[in-house]
Image: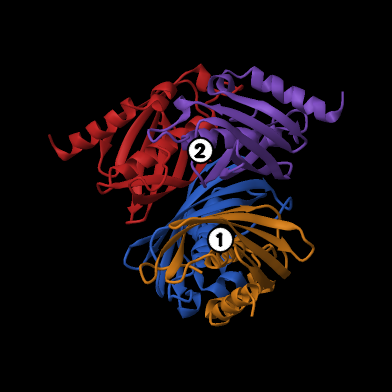
Chain colours: A red, B purple, C blue, D orange
Amino acid sequence: MGEREEFIDDLRSRMAASDFHRWLGIELVDARPGEVDLVLAAEPRHMNLQGLLHGGMIATLADTATGLAVRTKLEPGTRHVTVQLDVQFLSPGRPGSIFARGRVIRAGSQIAHAEADITDSGGKLLAKAHSTVAIMNDRKAGGSD
Amino acid sequence: MGEREEFIDDLRSRMAASDFHRWLGIELVDARPGEVDLVLAAEPRHMNLQGLLHGGMIATLADTATGLAVRTKLEPGTRHVTVQLDVQFLSPGRPGSIFARGRVIRAGSQIAHAEADITDSGGKLLAKAHSTVAIMNDRKAGGSD
Amino acid sequence: MGEREEFIDDLRSRMAASDFHRWLGIELVDARPGEVDLVLAAEPRHMNLQGLLHGGMIATLADTATGLAVRTKLEPGTRHVTVQLDVQFLSPGRPGSIFARGRVIRAGSQIAHAEADITDSGGKLLAKAHSTVAIMNDRKAGGSD
Amino acid sequence: MGEREEFIDDLRSRMAASDFHRWLGIELVDARPGEVDLVLAAEPRHMNLQGLLHGGMIATLADTATGLAVRTKLEPGTRHVTVQLDVQFLSPGRPGSIFARGRVIRAGSQIAHAEADITDSGGKLLAKAHSTVAIMNDRKAGGSD
């Protein structure tokens, strides 16, 4: 099994073990070192009163995608915690498949920076996000992925 | 019925009509002009794999609280859209009541700035957030509250 | 004179008329619709006590580059105001040429989103930035470019 | 000499030794553990073409104020690097004294969060900012204060 398949398997089992992601309807689509693709099956319950995808769901996708992208670059025995997230909301989203691509910009020994693009099934860019992630020795602190 | 009660009633019915907030478990606690208080009944399904409150839930609370705070300041016939959100994650959260206080910093005719503090039931500050909100004539564009 | 030359000429005269940019040592290199390139001749006075480019200079480049990129997309009679800026600092900078490329992500009638990459003369990425820009009718409010 | 005087003396000599801050016209006014006050003597050269304080100067004040506030909380042998800064621009500034108060929100062993309020001499709030700061062992990496 190649490097790429290992990443996907590891992340896929993490997400399958996560009640949070099953509950929200977020699944892993693909992963490469430093990059992951997620999909949210956006249903009416993910919409705000105006029938548009809630910004919190976009932020959740962004936080998850950037966190998992960083995870693909971590050394064994380390863990990551999102310490800051910013999201630029560009276009409203609607029910259907919503994709998030998370990508590491720079991973140091202590800090990683990552970004995410959120797009709909027509390829329209709904949001861009950046996160700042602290990397620490295992069991030292709590994360958010 | 005084001004304060009207705010609360209007916002409470908005949230009661929202499948999204019922599904997530977010409720309005109180509201004043320019400020709202929300609570999330954080359950195990809101946690990440480490048993800690997912950053996306904190971002959702922050987006909702800042958006509703701005809504208390809107003229009739206008609507708001969150165009940018940033969150500073300070401490990990756990199951239990999670509170969000949203507050308008400045509301102009076209742009509003708002902030939110997210705290747990012991009063510990879990996160701080800011949002930038566009204000537009009704039916012009989609929002995210 | 083609469209591209007009953009460059207009922006170049704006910057030449700006005491601020002359004082800081920021110049326009090139411009296309929705995109501009700037350079800062970073000298010892731009450095912090550790001999590294001050974060404020990077933020200044980012604010200027994103603001000018938005300006290339504005209708006559409108003006822009940066309402929010975030910067991710990735690597330390040193004296020498520092480049900023500003790029519009989305320009609506009321709000524009833009981003900037800051690089050194060796092509190393020093920072990434996003800005949220309000677009308004002329003389309505103050900008920051 | 009390604790407070030591903070002020240490920070004042840092800033006096800084060509950058002298060049820009930024001075320390006061400091307490976890909090500092700076002033910029804003002159016409700090203004943009519209005669308003450039957003980059506000970001520079914010980065400096939050960085110095974090520095008051550092253990000996550690140093700080701003890894992320976001600024909300609220009102335009004009020539005159511009004040920045930087304040630590949370300082951990590896990450600190700080915020700054930028006000003019009439007490009007011009901007709010947050920064995320990495704390590391001395000589490990470059900072931006």
Number of disc labels: 2
Q: Where C78 falls versus D68 (above or below)?
A: above
What residue sits 42% from the left and 68% below the top? C98
Q: Disc number at residue D65?
A: none
- Which residue in the structure is indicated by mark 1? C10
Q: Is disc 2 placed on a helix, strand or loop? A: loop
Q: Residue furthest left?
A: A1
Q: Residue furthest right?
A: B1
Viewer-closest of C82 and B87: B87
- Which residue in the structure is indicated by mark 2? B93
Q: In the image, A9: left or right of D120?
A: left
Q: Where B19 falls versus A5 (above or below)?
A: above
Viewer-closest of B19 and B71: B19
Viewer-closest of D70 and A5: D70
- Label 2: chain? B
| Amino acid marked by disc 1 | Asp
What x and y, as percent, mark residue D8? Answer: 62, 75
